[in-house]
């Protein structure tokens, strides 16, 4: 708590010093306008108090405008796309851009599973409660914005500790019957990316759709991939009050997994691969229906219903990376590979309403709604596959070693309210009720487990919180919020991973809270900023202990993350002159200082031994700092962006193991720095040429180690790559 107080004092002192440089007499006479406009200097915007029946006032958030960024969108380069959102941790082991692995505040970036990940407001994760990993990321070229809301999103969207990531797809041109967009990209190591979209409006009907394909041989050996994505949407505006929409997305991909490396292999040649027979694919489909109705001048209704139909398929040789995948001289064949397959079928409906009403001379806002969700996961693992090398999911033995059926039923109700107190202050209390029921059944082909009769877990959870905003000027405010969160026990935590592993029958869901305090806004038209401190409490973390000589999966303790997040962007030219003939130069800095440590260790037998207790040790994959700096220069129709990223060293296990083990699944990863350079040129208003260099200095670095897919072992980030792109809009 002393560190928290010091951080808060540092933040307040910074604000005071900053305020002393401003002529406060001029601030006082500024008109007190509602802070609802969306400002953008370099692609980062704020949000209005309410949008689409959701309250954003008092929350830590950022909206990324993709059309304002100079970034390599052809490979979904998250390092560049999220560069101006402070504190975002990124796993960069997959150069294909098929899956985004991001997190914040010391949480795990594993397929973004600590975020509630959505597309156009509906879920796209495998199973939002039981298996929240996100295998589908829409192509960034198809996006209009990405909304990032930190922990306080739990009240409106669900209980994830990380908050919300919402990918917003472009819409059809309201002024054209037919608009066409195309972008063709070629790059290093056989990269070919094609994106083509059409959209428009005919009378009351608007539509938008795209087709996307990307393929490459990959920067590392044995890392070829190809992905196909399609999307179509139509909206019919019956009248000024009522709109009906339908959306459909489909993706299919095949990705060769080069596997991990030992530390010695990484140091000698980090492009090397000793796994040529490992493959991964995750076909995905989702359909959504939307209904918007303006009931009266002050009350509106929005309904989203969706269904996700997806799979996770893998085949490969999964022994430790220090064990060679070799041919058996007796059979002249490779060892049979392991086949794992998941099937996901999820349905959900969310109803959101917003009502405005007068209290005195102020219009307050009440938002409320309900959610119904059902998730089905069929998990088949440890299958005996072929001895081949292709993406072949055929079994040589029809019985899987593990076959489980998981089911989730969820009902939720939520409410949030904005109270406007005077012209400056907004108070935003809220609450959410969750009813979650999980069930599992199936078998695990071991003598200690065998058949598993259907087991159910039910719980009722109440989340609550409150936020506030205080308007300092017409363009800036101080914001604060506190909200509770929880994370249900996931399917993998309910399933024994070893033949003798035992699962605690009283395994508890993770719980905790997020808190934010910050100051954000703008100075004129030349500075955007957001400076804040945070605290995240994470109780009942799940891990494995040794009890009576056997692995025992239980709640091992708690962790806390605290720190500072800041974003500042300055338009240098506008700060000193209104002369646009010399071009436009902006500079940004996005910084985060993170102190994420374990605060409790629930193993009394060894709690007093500092050599084995994890208390006061750093949370795995939680860097102590993440700094990103960049500059963009625009002259007429030419723009260039340089971005520098530096991230601190991380431990890869809770025990904070310094040196790597033989299999390279644990061990500290050093700090690294990566630079990117991008260019864009517009021609005749309709055409563009884009080019760039990713990892300009060819930095050798790694962001993670893996114990299973896509490893095991150390997984390097991509080295230097180039791209060039040509596009047109008609």
Image (spheres, grey):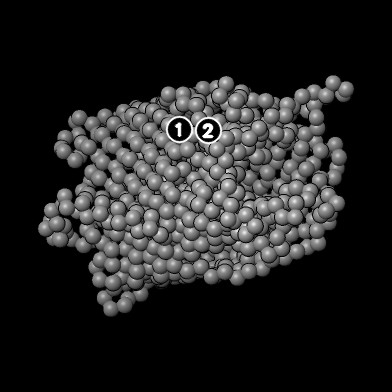
Residue 204 seen by the camera: no
Residue 399: percent from left, percent from top: 85, 45
| Residue 488 falls in image quadrant | bottom right
Q: Is any atom of residue 628 visible in this view? A: yes
Quadrant location of the N terminus in the rendered image: bottom left
| Residue at the front extreme of this rendering | 609
Q: Which residue is mark 1?
A: 672
Could you say which is closer to the camera, residue 1 or residue 333?
1
In front here: 383 or 410? 383
Vertical position of residue 461 compared to residue 487: above or below: below
Residue found at x 42% / y 48%:
594
* Residue 73: assigned label: none
Residue at image x 26%, y 41%? 570
Is residue 178 positioned above or below 11 on the image?
above
Would residue 122 be found to the left or right of residue 565 on screen?
Answer: right
Tell me the residue at 76%/45% (across/down): 381
Mark found first going from the N terminus, 1 or 2: 1
Residue ID for mark 2 = 702
Q: Quadrant of residue 375?
A: bottom right
**Dot 1: few (<14), some (14–19), or many (≥20) neighbours within 10 Å?**
some
| Direction from residue 594 to residue 255 in the image, left or right | right
The reply to whether dot 1 and dot 2 touch (C-beta < 8 Å) is: yes
Q: Percent from the top left, x then y, of residue 371?
A: 56, 65
Q: Residue 730's spot in the image, x, y percent?
A: 41, 35
């Amino acid at each position: 708590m002393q560190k928290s107080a010091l951080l808060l004092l540092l933040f307040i002192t910074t604000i005071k010093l900053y305020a002393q440089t401003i002529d406060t007499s001029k601030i006082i006479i500024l008109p007190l306008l509602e802070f609802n406009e969306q400002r953008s200097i370099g692609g980062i915007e704020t949000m209005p108090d309410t949008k689409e029946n959701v309250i954003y006032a008092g929350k830590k958030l950022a909206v990324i405008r993709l059309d304002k960024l100079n970034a390599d969108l052809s490979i979904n380069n998250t390092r560049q796309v999220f560069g101006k959102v402070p504190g975002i941790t990124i796993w960069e082991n997959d150069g294909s851009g098929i899956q985004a692995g991001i997190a914040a505040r010391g949480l795990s970036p594993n397929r973004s599973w600590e975020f509630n990940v959505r597309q156009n407001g509906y879920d796209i994760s495998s199973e939002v409660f039981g298996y929240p990993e996100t295998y589908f990321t829409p192509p960034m070229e198809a996006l209009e914005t990405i909304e990032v809301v930190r922990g306080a999103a739990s009240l409106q969207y669900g209980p994830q500790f990380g908050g919300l990531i919402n990918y917003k797809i472009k819409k059809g041109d309201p002024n054209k019957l037919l608009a066409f967009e195309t972008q063709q990209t070629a790059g290093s190591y056989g990269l070919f990316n094609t994106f083509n979209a059409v959209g428009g409006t005919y009378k009351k009907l608007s539509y938008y759709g795209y087709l996307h394909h990307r393929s490459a041989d990959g920067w590392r050996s044995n890392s070829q991939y190809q992905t196909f994505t399609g999307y179509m949407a139509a909206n019919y505006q019956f009248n000024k009050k009522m709109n009906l929409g339908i959306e459909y997305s489909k993706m299919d991909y095949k990705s060769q997994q080069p596997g991990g490396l030992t530390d010695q292999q990484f140091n000698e040649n980090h492009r090397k691969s000793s796994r040529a027979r490992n493959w991964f694919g995750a076909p995905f489909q989702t359909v959504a229906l939307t209904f918007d109705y303006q009931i009266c001048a002050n009350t509106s209704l929005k309904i989203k219903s969706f269904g996700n139909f997806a799979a996770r398929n893998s085949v490969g040789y999964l022994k430790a990376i220090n064990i060679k995948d070799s041919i058996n001289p007796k059979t002249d064949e490779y060892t049979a590979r392991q086949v794992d397959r998941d099937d996901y079928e999820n349905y959900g409906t969310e109803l959101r309403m917003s009502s405005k009403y007068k209290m005195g001379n102020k219009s307050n806002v009440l938002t409320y709604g309900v959610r119904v969700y059902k998730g089905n996961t069929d998990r088949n693992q440890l299958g005996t596959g072929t001895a081949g090398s292709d993406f072949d999911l055929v079994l040589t033995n029809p019985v899987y070693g593990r076959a489980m059926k998981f089911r989730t039923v969820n009902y939720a109700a939520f409410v949030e309210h904005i109270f406007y107190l005077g012209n400056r202050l907004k108070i935003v209390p809220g609450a959410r009720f969750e009813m979650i029921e999980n069930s599992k059944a199936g078998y695990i082909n071991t003598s200690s487990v065998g058949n598993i009769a259907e087991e159910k877990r039910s719980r009722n959870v109440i989340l609550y919180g409150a936020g506030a905003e205080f308007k300092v000027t017409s363009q800036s405010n101080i914001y604060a919020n506190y909200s509770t969160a929880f994370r249900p026990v996931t399917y993998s935590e309910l399933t024994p991973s070893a033949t003798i592993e035992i699962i605690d029958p009283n395994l508890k869901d993770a719980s905790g809270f997020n808190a934010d305090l910050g100051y954000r806004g703008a100075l004129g038209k030349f500075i955007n900023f957001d400076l804040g401190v945070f605290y995240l409490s994470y109780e009942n973390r799940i891990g494995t202990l040794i009890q009576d000589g056997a692995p025992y999966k239980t709640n091992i303790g708690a962790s806390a993350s605290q720190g500072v997040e800041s974003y500042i962007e300055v338009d240098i030219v506008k700060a000193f002159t209104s002369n646009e003939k010399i071009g436009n130069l902006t500079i940004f800095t996005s910084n985060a200082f993170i102190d994420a440590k374990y605060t409790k260790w629930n193993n009394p037998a060894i709690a007093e031994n500092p050599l084995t207790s994890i208390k006061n040790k750093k949370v795995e994959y939680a860097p102590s700092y993440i700094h990103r700096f960049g500059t963009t220069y625009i002259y007429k129709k030419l723009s260039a962006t340089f971005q520098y990223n530096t991230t601190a060293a991380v431990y890869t296990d809770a025990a904070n193991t310094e040196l790597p083990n033989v299999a390279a699944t644990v061990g500290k990863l050093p700090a690294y720095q990566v630079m990117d350079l991008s260019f864009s040129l517009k021609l005749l208003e309709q055409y563009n040429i884009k080019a760039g260099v990713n990892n300009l200095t060819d930095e050798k670095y790694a962001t993670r180690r893996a114990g299973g897919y896509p490893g095991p072992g150390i997984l390097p980030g991509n080295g230097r790559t180039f791209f060039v792109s040509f596009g047109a809009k008609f």
